[in-house]
Image (spheres, rainbow, N blue to C red):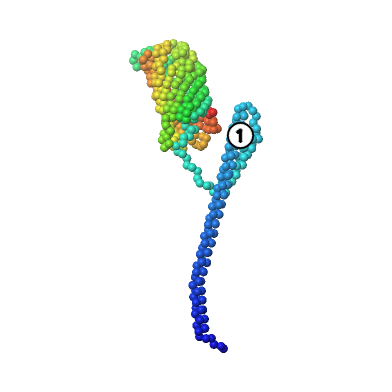
Amino acid sequence: MKSVPTKLRLDRTIHFSFITLSLYLAVPQFCYAAQSTSEDDELIDFYQVELEKQRTMLLEQGQQIAELKRMVDALSENRQVQATQQHVKKAGKPVNASKVVVANNTSRKVAKETSLSRTDNKPVGQAPPKNANAIDVNAIPKLNDNVSGVLTGKGSLVLETSIGYSYTDNNRVFLDAFSFIPALVVGLIDLREIKRHSFIGSVSARYGITERWEVDLKLPYIARNDSQRSRPVSIGVSEDEIFNASGHGMGDIELSTRYQLNAPTDGGPIYVANLVATIPTGTSPFEVEFMQSTPGAVFPTELPTGSGYVSIQPSLTAIYATDPGVFFGNVSYGYNMDTDENVGNVDPGDSAGVSFGLGVSLNERTSMSLSYSHKHVLKSKINNMKIDGSQLDIGQLIIGYSFRYSELTNISLSLAIGVTDDAQDTRLNFRVPVTF
């Protein structure tokens, strides 16, 4: 075997060592580069997955927005068709039923698709909270016949038709006698049982001059019927005296105006100033004739339909909204002007009243209320002399119900129960205000 020279073997050894060292240094760098490339690939895959999730979420939200837009368009089309139908109905022309059917079918279809999509997709966001300062109009009833709880919008006209019924049953003792000692009375002692039925129908027009100022005109028609049973106990009468009287005709016209004093934005109360004037257009009590059946027993031949004097009543209403109810209250003072009659100068006596209560909205279309009204009437005067027994206290507990029949029509029903002797036993009032 041929031997290799020593120098050549040494060169080969050095060359092999250099190659080994080069490989030893290059392998870690190659491994590090391969590891970096793998991490970048994983990061790119992660971002691609996240982008795909965001794209899917945006597509779902876009579908929901498109479905809501279709539903709104269908409801708008249905409302336009209904408005056209009402307009054509008022004009007395036939209505195209095909448009109504198409609009109703479209609304049902969109509502069905929306309900199905809501079951498949999760809701986006959440509904805005209720505004505790917003006042539900339906939850505020009328505090009494003259004071309203809300105002009419600017340029809006409200025509209101109302029908009322009241019933009063009381017993009275009429004394036209002289008392010498507590046990001896000389003269007429008359015991009477009076049953009074009253029907009041009225038409009123309310117009909003501005958003905070409205005026009102009310034209009432009154029909009354009284039944009195009398028994004079101080004279020899064997049978009861029964006397019936009635009266019907135009009542006293009412003119009123209301102004909202403030418009709070921080949840405070709202104050409304009211002014009501009553003009004596009905039959006056001083114009009614009387007849005498039993000596000393006098009965009217006709019942009056008006008060016979001018009345001016300013008042202040406070309204405070607290979800889901509305608190309201009213204080009033009635100034009754004196009038000159055959009996002399008659001063009916002023009055002071207070009302308060709570209205609660049961749902979007129905509300109920509970309130109390009390009025104190001062003594009347004739020729500047007070009349004993003419002072009155009228207290009533009022239960109200309101139903929104449509966007322009409401139906209200109230029941007033007398809690004092001078108040009517029962008063039922049915109102239908329509907005134009």
Q: Position of residue 45 (x, y in %)?
A: 54, 59
Given residues 31 and 324, the one toward you in this image is: 31
- Look at the image and tell me whether residue 373 can be seen: no
Seen in the picture, residue 164 relative to 77 is either above or below; the reply is: above
Seen in the picture, residue 150 relative to 24 is either above or below; the reply is: above
- Horizontal side, residue 418 vs residue 108: left or right: left
Task: Give the image quarter of residue 111.
Answer: top right
Given residues 43 and 122, the one toward you in this image is: 43
Given residues 434 and 187, the one toward you in this image is: 434
Name the image quarter holding the N terminus.
bottom right
Q: Amino acid at mark 1?
A: Val
In the current view of this chain or complex, which residue is farthest to the bottom? 1
Disc 1: which residue: 81
In the current view of this chain or complex, which residue is farthest to the left? 181
Q: Secondary structure at mark 1?
A: helix
Q: Position of residue 68 (x, y in %)?
A: 57, 43
Q: Position of residue 425 (x, y in %)?
A: 46, 25
Given residues 80 and 147, the one toward you in this image is: 80
Name the image quarter holding the C terminus.
top right
Q: Position of residue 286 (x, y in %)?
A: 44, 14
Q: Which residue is rendered at x = 45% and y = 25% of the image?
A: 257
Badge count: 1
**Callout 1 environment at 10 Å: few (<14), some (14 to 19), or many (20+)?**
many
Q: Which residue is rendered at x = 45% and y = 16% of the image?
A: 308
- Look at the image and tell me whether residue 14 can be seen: yes
Q: Which residue is rendered at x = 48% and y = 34% of the image?
A: 136
